[in-house]
Image: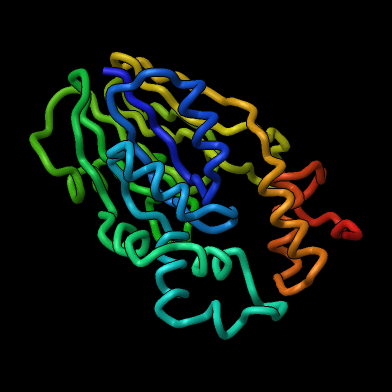
């Protein structure tokens, strides 16, 4: 089987479309969470995932958006310096989008090409910690894997935005496809990162894409005000040419 693995989409439909073109034909799509926040097109990103029948788990930013939506934060904070990308996204998702996010599981078990997979967004809430020992790995596996234990095992995580394959034993790996949307502050690679698993072989892939529409949306907030400065600085780094995520904002 040829599997497309994506994570941390963050409302970036342009990146998803570029990934789809670059990846070519696949048998199934899997996503390790974070479909919304810090991007400009949450509805379109969720629609892309749903239309392709992707198998998905919930991310922490998805839960954050739902909490903000339920609290009515977007309306209360609109036009203030406390307004964030999550609030912008709250005003762009449909009730159907929210229902999709609410229904997402925290964990997903599946098998492909004789390998058992367990997928979840992060190992622990409010943490970037990952399983670094077989004891931690087995604890997670025994708690969440839904199926018979046999053969090679792999866990798929998102959350860190770091591409990784970590081998704890010959038949026990955990892996991360990186973020389809943006990098951590120490990584200026602007490409969309994703992973292909082709007949069991793990392949890291990345593709450049047009970020101008998202930059234009962010610049509109810069000109008119009404968004938290650090969220706009992040956008200048993710979608523009800022060399760090805390450069001064441009002058309109």
Q: Is residue 17 left or right of residue 198?
A: right
Extreme residue toward the bottom, this view: 76
The picture quadrant where one finds residue 32 is top left
Q: Residue at x 47, y 75 (%)?
A: 68
Q: Is residue 193 left or right of residue 123?
A: right
Q: Position of residue 196 (x, y in %)?
A: 41, 22
Q: Position of residue 166 (x, y in %)?
A: 43, 30
In the picture shown, does residue 98 fall above or below 207?
below
Q: Is residue 116 left or right of residue 163?
A: left
Q: Position of residue 48 (x, y in %)?
A: 40, 42
Residue 173 visible? The answer is yes
Q: Residue at x 70, y 45 (%)?
A: 239
Extreme residue toward the right, this view: 251
Q: Position of residue 220 (x, y in %)?
A: 75, 61
> Dividing the image into 4 quarters, which one contains the C terminus?
bottom right
Residue 131 visible? The answer is no
Q: How many marks?
A: 0
In the picture shown, does residue 56 fall above or below 191?
below
Q: Residue at x 62, y 69 (%)?
A: 84
In the picture shown, does residue 80 fall above or below 111?
below
Colour approach in the figure: rainbow
Q: Residue at x 39, y 57 (%)?
A: 124
Along the line of sight, which residue is nearer the eye, 81 or 210? 210
In the picture shown, does residue 205 fall above or below 86?
above
> Dividing the image into 4 quarters, which one contains the N terminus?
top left
């Amino acid at each position: 089987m040829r599997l497309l693995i994506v994570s941390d989409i963050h409302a970036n439909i342009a990146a998803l479309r570029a990934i789809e073109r670059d990846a070519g034909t696949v048998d199934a799509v899997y996503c390790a969470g974070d479909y919304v926040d810090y991007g400009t097109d949450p509805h379109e990103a969720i629609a892309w995932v749903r239309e392709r029948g992707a198998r998905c788990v919930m991310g922490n930013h998805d839960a954050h958006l739902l909490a903000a939506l339920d609290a009515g934060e977007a309306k209360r904070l609109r036009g203030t310096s406390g307004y964030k990308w999550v609030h912008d996204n709250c005003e762009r998702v449909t009730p159907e989008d929210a229902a999709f996010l609410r229904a997402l599981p925290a964990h997903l078990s599946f098998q492909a090409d004789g390998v058992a997979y367990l997928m979840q967004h992060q190992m622990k809430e409010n943490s970037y910690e990952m399983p670094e020992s077989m004891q931690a790995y087995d604890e997670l596996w025994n708690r969440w894997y839904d199926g018979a234990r046999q053969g090679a095992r792999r866990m798929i995580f998102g959350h860190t935005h770091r591409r990784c394959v970590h081998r704890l034993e010959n038949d026990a790996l955990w892996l991360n496809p990186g973020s389809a949307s943006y990098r951590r502050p120490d990584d200026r690679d602007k490409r969309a990162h994703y992973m292909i698993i082709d007949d069991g072989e793990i392949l890291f892939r990345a593709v450049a894409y047009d970020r101008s529409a998202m930059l234009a949306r962010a610049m509109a907030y810069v000109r008119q005000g009404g968004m938290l400065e650090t969220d706009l600085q992040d956008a200048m780094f993710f979608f523009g040419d800022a060399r760090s995520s805390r450069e001064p904002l441009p002058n309109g």
